[in-house]
Amino acid sequence: MTDSTTQGPILVPIANPETADQLVSTAADIATDTGRPLEALTVIRVPEQVPLSEGERLVTDEREILDYAADLVSDPAIQVSSRIRFARSIASGILSVAEEQDIETILMGWRGRPRRRDIILGSHLDQVLRKASCDVLVKRMDGDEELQQILLPVAGGPNTKLAATVAGSLARVHDAEIRVIVVHSPNETTDTRDEKETMLEGVIAGFTGVPVITQEIVESDSVGDTIVDQSKDVDLVVLGATSEDLFRRSVIGSLPEQVGRRSASSVLMVKEHRNIPSRLARLISRLRREILRF
């Protein structure tokens, strides 16, 4: 894919210095390739009984963590800023900063822990993925990776373009290889395979400046198992979120969540923001049109 045309800031919420290295490194790579500024953020949760104006007294070592994060950005061309936000919840603090600062992308870390009831990736992550009015990237970290090979599974979904754009940025900065795969079930028709080949060629044609690109249509009945198996031979899997269901039980899609938990490599899941009216909004609009007819 070509470089992103958007030049809005990348927001990196940081709570733990142990994960700051990989998060800031990934954000800095994207910023280097696209010329975008970085904003490091730490949110301090203020209990309901404490006024937000008194949140300052809850600050401990957060400023040192932010300074450490800023020092991780070695490219002098990247504009880096940082802030502490006091909020009633971590998610509300992240979302409010994203709105106020016209953030284009939020990059968050994920430990890949087992799902708890009614919580998909994590309480903060779930809320940000559902409510953010910008792109959201979620990285499941797997130690310190030397980025040489990136796996990009594509299926033509709504987040394929963003996934390819992010993979392209990382590959250009690291001179890494991108392996683009499409999974085709033996039970699917020849026409379906032809459509997938056309889609694969379109994704490949969109890249610029990537040193090595390989492509493959993999015959398999399980997309998830195929991606997990191929993750053993790469350093990072980049894949787009799949659509949510009617009741929003899924915030990223069952396939990316499955891959995110089982992958042998680090995983970067991407979800592009789209101004699509909700089903309820469409229903109200339709009812209003019907009423106006009478």
Image (cartoon, grey):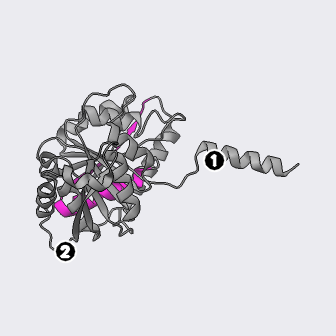
Residue under the image location 44 percent in, 55 percent down = 133
The image shows residue 158 at horizontal and vertical percentages of 47, 49
The image shows residue 72 at horizontal and vertical percentages of 12, 60
The numbered mark at residue 77 is 2
Q: Is residue 42 above or below residue 216?
A: below
Q: Is residue 225 above or below residue 159?
A: above
In the image shown, does 153 or 133 lie closer to the viewer?
Answer: 133
Tell me the element at label 2: loop
Residue under the image location 33 percent in, 42 percent down = 49
The verdict on residue 184 being magenta is: yes
- Give the amino acid type for the residue marked by disc 2 in the picture: Ala
User: Residue 224, located in which quarter of the rendered image?
Assistant: top left
Farthest residue to the top: give it.
117
Residue, disc 1: 281
Image quadrant for the N terminus?
bottom left
The image shows residue 198 at horizontal and vertical percentages of 45, 51
- Give the amino acid type for the residue marked by disc 1 in the picture: Ala
The numbered mark at residue 193 is none
| Label 2 – label 1 distance at C-alpha | 43 Å
Find the magenta span and give its range: 159-186
Earlier in the chain: of badge 2 and badge 1, it is 2
Farthest residue to the bottom: give it.
77
